[in-house]
Image (spheres, rainbow, N blue to C red):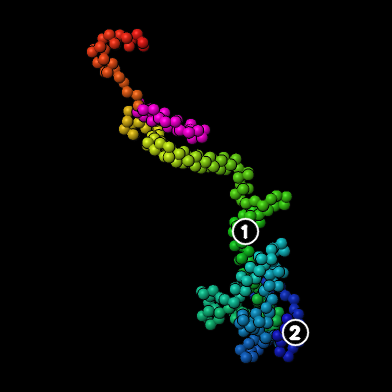
């Protein structure tokens, strides 16, 4: 750390992080030189954050390492350092100090309120600002559910276990989730299987497709026949053809040709019996 004194040797000072206003101190004389406060020990107070950072580039980083959680990750320490640096270099837009033309925390240092401008009292003010901000950050971190120490990482790995996700962990310990996942998988498989069968029917005998649509759209076979606008006997014949196609689809065997609709010959037989009574008797004997 480079020297910051004027005519007086820089010397270390021990101080706490609590506000000096709460204690009884004897005012320490200070002067103003080139627009900067100069303490009784010769310490020159930086005029703004930029000058402060040029003098002490590692000040906030060292402060975080000292006051942060010892078990904190390095990336967390770096994030806290950046947040505190941003806090020091910029005042809130609604801050009352902006009305006096001040833009950062360093500029708000007032030697009259802090009983002097020596190095110890300036550092105590900076440490106080860092402490207050760090406490606010810590409170927000505690209230944030994502920052709880007991959380499982989305791609975390525990000792003795393989790489797993939160979804896998929940499914492994919840019978309800396992049953729901199994039902969802079955539903997806059934839909895919039905799609393959419809494609097969469309290729082999597309006339049966309306029957499939009617069965899926209604609850009973009678309702399906009404939905198609055909008789039950016609619907039964189409359903038997559908059953025949399903057996071929499952077995992989060639699809058999469908028989033609059966036509009753009662009227013809009566006509034949009336015109040829002897032949009718012969047909009866053969039957």
Q: Are marks 2 and 1 in contact (CB under 8 Å)?
A: no
- The one nearer the camera, 150 or 222, is 222
Which residues lie in the magenta part?
A: 232-260
Q: Looking at the image, is mark 2 or mark 1 nearer the viewer?
A: 1
**Residue 51 percent location from the top left of the image:** 63, 83
Instruction: Give the label on residue 10, or none.
Output: 2
Q: Is residue 231 visible?
A: yes
Residue 245 is inside the magenta segment: yes
> If you read the primary sequence from the N terminus, does the residue marked by circle 2 or circle 1 appear first?
2
Q: Quadrant of the N terminus?
A: bottom right
- The one nearer the camera, 98 or 273, is 273
At 33% across and 34% down in the image, what residue appears? Answer: 228
Query: Relative to 151, is 246 on the left or the right?
Result: left
Instruction: Give the label on residue 85, or none.
Output: none
> Quadrant location of residue 146?
bottom right
What kind of element bears circle 2? loop
Q: Quadrant of the C terminus?
A: top left
Q: Which residue is mark 1?
A: 147
Query: Relative to 14, is 154 on the left or the right?
Result: left
Give the vertical position of 169 relative to 15 (above or below): above
At 64% across and 53% down in the image, what residue appears? Answer: 152
Q: Is residue 26 visible?
A: no
At 66% across and 56% down in the image, what residue appears? Answer: 149
* Neighbour tally class for label 2: few under 14, some 14-19, many 20 plus, Cα within 10 Å: some
Give the vertical position of 194 relative to 94 (above or below): above
> Quadrant location of residue 90?
bottom right
> Quadrant location of residue 229?
top left
């Amino acid at each position: 750390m480079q020297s910051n004194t004027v005519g007086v040797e820089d010397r270390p000072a021990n101080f706490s992080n609590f506000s000096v206003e709460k204690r009884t101190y004897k005012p320490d004389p200070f002067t103003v030189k080139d627009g900067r406060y100069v303490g009784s020990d010769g310490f020159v107070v930086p005029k703004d954050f930029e000058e402060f950072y040029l003098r002490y580039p590692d000040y906030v980083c060292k402060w975080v390492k000292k006051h942060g959680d010892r078990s904190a990750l390095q990336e967390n320490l770096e994030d806290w350092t950046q947040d505190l640096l941003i806090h020091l270099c910029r005042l809130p837009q609604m801050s009352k100090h902006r009305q006096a033309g001040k833009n950062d925390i360093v500029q708000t240092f007032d030697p009259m309120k802090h009983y002097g401008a020596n190095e110890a009292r300036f550092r105590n003010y900076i440490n106080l600002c860092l402490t207050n901000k760090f406490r606010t950050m810590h409170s927000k971190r505690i209230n944030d559910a994502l920052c709880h120490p007991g959380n499982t990482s989305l791609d975390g790995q525990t000792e003795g276990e393989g790489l797993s996700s939160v979804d896998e962990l929940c499914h492994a310990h919840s019978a309800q989730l396992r049953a729901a996942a199994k039902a969802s998988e079955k539903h997806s498989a059934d839909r895919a299987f039905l799609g393959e069968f419809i494609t097969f029917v469309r290729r082999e005998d597309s006339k049966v497709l309306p029957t499939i649509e009617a069965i899926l759209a209604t609850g009973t076979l009678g309702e399906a026949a009404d939905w198609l606008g055909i008789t039950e006997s016609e619907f039964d014949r189409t359903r038997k053809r559908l059953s025949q196609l399903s057996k071929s689809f499952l077995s992989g065997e060639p699809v058999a040709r469908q028989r033609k609709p059966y036509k009753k010959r009662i009227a013809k037989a009566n006509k034949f019996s009336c015109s040829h009574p002897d032949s009718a008797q012969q047909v009866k004997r053969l039957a």
